């Protein structure tokens, strides 16, 4: 299986960790490459260049003092950058990546005497120059070349007329009339060999997707949240799945009488009855807007805290403080609440008529509509039996594994 991303993001890293935790052998490919992609993540540029590099490359980083410069030119280093000088005049600026003390070169900008940056050389994690940008006097990129480890041109992109040339031993192997055509050809080549999944990360990527021409290329589409999944479905997209990340470790969570509810309205099922019946439990109700008089009045109870326009810092502390998440708010959820509660190892409970992610809840934590007495009883019983709480959360953690197993064995 190959999973494609437009670019490297936190979603890419989460998916890689999830696949590792599930012990699933899935290749991850990003269509943009900065030369420092993490191990196990490749790109179309690395794909074609690796064909030419016969020897296995070793990640060794490139230090500024080993940069190539014309004879009698001087390389200097000062803080987070460096420079290449000739006759006392700076002719290139060196940009570093990562910890300053390691002096790892990311790119070198070559300048004319008048300051015009005419070329930018890019270096990769193997310490080799993997690409060069050639710029006109106005600073626009005229072309970009990608090299093999022996400095042979493998891919040449001409930004002006949007033409991409694939080379082999100096001869044209393929010519593409656009960068998109180059990427689609690359993806189609891989798709012909393995099952392919596309990971759409935002609305812009979704809107640019041509479902009519590409629907046969992707076997499945992963989306990071319900909003994008619903948009994809409404556009006629099929085989779309919600992405659920599985952390390497779930945080330890002591059994505390603290419950969290996130809401965008004051329509919270049986909230007054639940808070009244559990005076020993502190309820934290957080909203992403100002709250109504109804919630303000609820906040007058000694065991209820209301957080209008909740900040990210406050929300973070609430996730760490609470042991229960109550999915009892009507209308849509905010802050991907149920999934985040699962990630933070809170025991999740809800009513049949308020659930946002039934698949993440244990059957015994889903209650009939309005049956608050049973929910109250279970919360109280679990608080008094910490070992039961730990067992329930361990079973709850497996819910995402079950979802992924269903995805991989759906044939």
Image (cartoon, grey):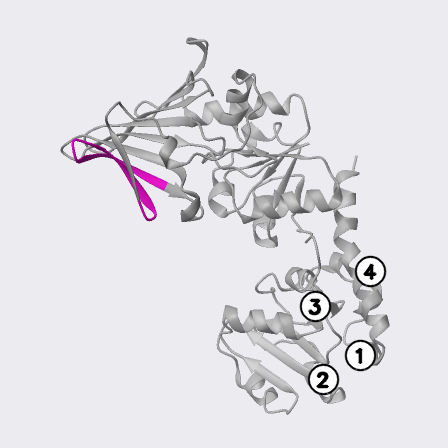
Magenta portion: prevailing SS class: strand
* Badge 1 vs badge 2, beta-carbon distance below 8 Å: yes
Residue 401 in percent (x, y) is at: 77, 50
User: How much space separates mark 3 and mark 1, taking CA atoms?
Assistant: 23 Å
Q: Is residue 92 magenta?
A: yes
Identify the residue at image location x=74%, y=88%: 280
Q: Is residue 85 magenta?
A: yes
Percent position of residue 188, x then y: 58, 23
Q: Secondary structure at mark 4?
A: helix
Q: Which mark is residue 383?
A: 1
Of discs 3 and 1, which sits in the foreground?
A: 1
* Residue at x-position 61% and y-position 39%: 237
Report the front residue among 53 and 82.
82
Image quadrant in which you'd find residue 67: top left
Image position of 307 with respect to 253: above or below: below
Q: CA distance from mark 1 to mark 2?
A: 9 Å
């Amino acid at each position: 299986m190959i999973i494609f991303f437009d670019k490297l993001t936190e979603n890419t890293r989460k998916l890689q960790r999830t696949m590792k935790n599930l012990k699933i052998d899935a290749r991850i490919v990003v269509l943009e490459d900065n030369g420092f992609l993490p191990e196990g993540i490749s790109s179309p540029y690395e794909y074609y260049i690796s064909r030419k590099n016969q020897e296995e490359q070793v990640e060794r980083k490139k230090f500024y003092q080993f940069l190539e410069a014309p004879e009698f030119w001087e390389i200097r280093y000062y803080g987070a950058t460096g420079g290449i000088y000739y006759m006392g005049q700076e002719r290139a600026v060196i940009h570093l990546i990562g910890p300053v003390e390691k002096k790892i070169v990311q790119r070198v900008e070559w300048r004319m005497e008048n300051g015009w940056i005419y070329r930018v050389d890019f270096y990769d994690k193997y310490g080799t120059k993997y690409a060069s940008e050639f710029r006109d006097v106005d600073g626009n990129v005229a072309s970009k070349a990608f090299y093999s480890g022996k400095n042979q041109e493998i891919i040449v992109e001409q930004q002006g007329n949007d033409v991409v040339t694939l080379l082999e031993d100096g001869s044209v192997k393929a010519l593409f009339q656009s960068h998109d055509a180059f990427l689609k050809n690359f993806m189609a080549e891989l798709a012909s060999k393995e099952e392919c999944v596309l990971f759409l990360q935002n609305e812009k990527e979704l809107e640019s997707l041509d479902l009519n021409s590409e629907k046969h290329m992707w076997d499945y589409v992963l989306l990071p949240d319900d909003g994008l999944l619903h948009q994809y479905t409404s556009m006629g997209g099929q085989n779309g799945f919600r992405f659920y990340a599985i952390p390497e470790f779930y945080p330890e969570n002591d059994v505390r009488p603290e419950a969290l509810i996130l809401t965008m309205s004051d329509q919270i099922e049986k909230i007054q009855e639940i808070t009244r019946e559990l005076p020993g439990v502190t309820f934290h109700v957080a909203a992403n807007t100002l709250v109504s008089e109804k919630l303000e009045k609820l906040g007058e109870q000694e065991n209820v805290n209301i957080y209008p326009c909740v900040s990210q810092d406050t929300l973070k502390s609430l996730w760490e403080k609470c042991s229960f998440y109550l999915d009892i708010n009507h209308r849509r959820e905010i802050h991907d609440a149920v999934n985040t509660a699962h990630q933070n190892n809170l025991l999740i409970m809800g009513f049949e008529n308020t659930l946002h992610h039934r698949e993440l809840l244990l059957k015994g934590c889903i209650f009939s509509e309005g049956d608050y007495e049973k929910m109250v009883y279970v919360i109280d019983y679990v608080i008094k039996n910490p070992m039961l709480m730990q067992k329930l959360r361990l079973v709850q953690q497996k819910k995402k594994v079950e979802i992924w197993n269903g995805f991989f064995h759906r044939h």
